[in-house]
Amino acid sequence: MKTPTFASSSVAASVVLAAVTLGVFGSAASIGPESVVLRYHEAVSVRNERELRDIQLQGNENPFVFELRVQTTQYLQFRPEVRIQRVASQDREAIVEVLYDFGPRGRVSKPFILRRQGSFWRIDAEATQLRLRQTFGLE
């Protein structure tokens, strides 16, 4: 039996390193603030209550949670292209600006505010809705 050479062991080490790197970045991408906002939209569109509970800071009994979900449902019923326009993150807070592109009917931009709890980002429906109200002079 032939013993491994330096070249084959280097290739094996490179493959292992690449797999670990992809795993770390892949898992980080699925829990980052922009990913959480996209997961929120998907969960709202299919009414996945379990997923919604996991990614919201407040519980379903909170009126701001209900209000945000109703608004998001109204946007999604027109089947817009949902894109992340901008992400600003500092410490334990992030603002994810979502662009709803309705094609010839226009565009709407809306910020989602997220808070980090441990290693997870969660949508803060109350802060999101209060910011929206302030933007329109309703608070």
Image (cartoon, grey):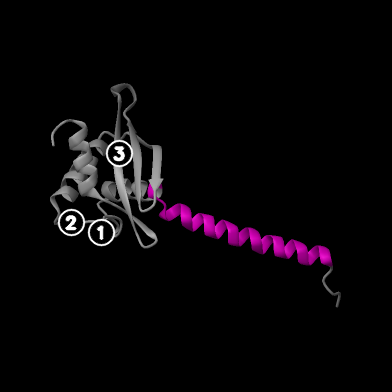
Q: Residues within 10 Å of mark 3 (few under 14, many from 20)?
A: many
Count of numbered circles in the view: 3
Q: Label 1: state its secondary structure.
A: helix
Which residue in the protein does label 3 denote? 111
Which residue in the protein does label 2 denote? 60
Image quadrant for the N terminus? bottom right
Report the disc number at residue 108. none
- Where residue 85 appears, as percent x and y from the top left, is 39, 35
**Residue 117 occupies which quadrant of the picture?**
bottom left
Compare residues 103 and 124 and report the one nearer the observer. 124
Measured in 3D between alpha carbons, the distance from the residue under mark 3 to the one under mark 2, in whole angstroms, is 20 Å
- Where residue 42 appears, as percent x and y from the top left, is 32, 48
Residue type at the position of mark 2 = Asn
Q: Label 2: state its secondary structure.
A: loop
Most common secondary structure along the magenta stretch:
helix
Circles 1 and 2: CB atoms closer than 8 Å:
yes
Residue type at the position of mark 1 = Arg
Measured in 3D between alpha carbons, the distance from the residue under mark 1 to the one under mark 3, in whole angstroms, is 20 Å
Q: Magenta region: which residues?
A: 6-34
Residue 73 visible in the picture? no
Sequence-first tag of 1 and 2: 1
Q: Residues within 10 Å of mark 1 (few under 14, many from 20)?
A: some
**Residue 122 occupies which quadrant of the picture?**
bottom left
Residue type at the position of mark 3 = Pro
Q: Is residue 34 left or right of residue 59?
A: right
Between marks 3 and 2 in the image, the one whose residue lies nearer the viewer: 3
Which residue in the protein does label 1 denote? 53
Q: Is residue 78 above or below residue 64?
A: above
Q: Is residue 68 above or below residue 103?
A: below
Q: Label 3: state its secondary structure.
A: strand
